[in-house]
Amino acid sequence: MNAIPQDLYQKIKQYVGHKVRNKEDVQDIVQNVFVKVQLHSGELRETEKIIGWIYRITQNSITDYYRLRKKEQLGVWVEPEEDRHLFNECVEQCLSVLSNQLPEPYKEALQLSEKENISQLELAERWGISYSGAKSRVQRARLLLKQKMETLYHIKTDAYGNVLVCEDRGPCGCDSSDTLKENN
């Protein structure tokens, strides 16, 4: 595949624009889609299905974009920002403390997959278990952390994942009250 028709480029850009609000992110996603198309065009066996194939790559890229944003919003893998909301910091701190309280091997699974960004396939090889076993371990770690957070907190977020309400249901031991006092 040598050149991407301009109308196809515009259609993909419009499609991504309906799914992603930030214009710079739309441009980045579209660019990444067409880089992937160029890199993997030799793998396409049925060339008459190229449009569907490109849309599948596009949808996967959008999913990856939101998956990355979710990780950032959960505080598991966050780049520091100057204007981060106070509640986001509190939730991030508590997530970090609570993830360290998970039983092994779930603590390690979460640490390696979320904080160190190691793929589940690499984890399976490292641990000498099946891919599905590694995937299950990471999913179970996430579920345990989510259950622990839901037990301790009532959290509401806006459409962008910013924490609007964070109310204790009981003490978590993560010194979030100290964080709130320091910033008031």
Image (tube, grey):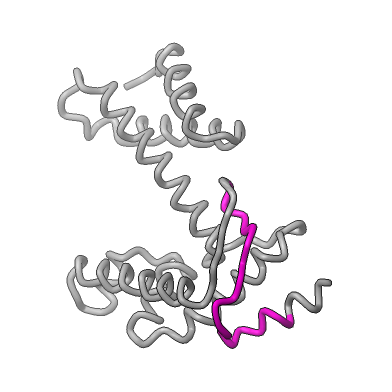
Q: Is residue 14 above or below residue 81?
A: above
Residue located 57% across and 55% down the image: 157
Residue located 60% across and 35% down the image: 22
Res. 131 image quadrant: bottom left
Q: Is residue 25 above or below residue 138?
A: above
Locate residue 15, reporting x and y percent: 44, 25
Query: Is 73 colored magenta in this rendering?
Result: no
Quarter of the figure that contains the N terminus: top left
State the count of labels.
0
Query: Is 165 colored magenta in this rendering?
Result: yes
Locate residue 165, reporting x and y percent: 63, 62
Q: Is residue 107 above or below residue 132?
A: below
Nearer the observer, 159 or 75: 159
Residue located 73% across and 77% down the image: 179
Residue located 52% across and 67% down the image: 76
* Residue sitting at the far right: 184
Quarter of the figure that contains the C terminus: bottom right
Give the magenta-colored segment's residue range.
160-178
Nearer the observer, 122 or 19: 19
Res. 102 image quadrant: bottom left
- In the rendered structure, the answer to whether residue 81 lies left or right of residue 174 reads right
Res. 90 image quadrant: bottom right
Nearer the observer, 150 or 93: 150
Q: Is residue 151 above or below residue 139?
A: below
Locate residue 93, reporting x and y percent: 61, 75
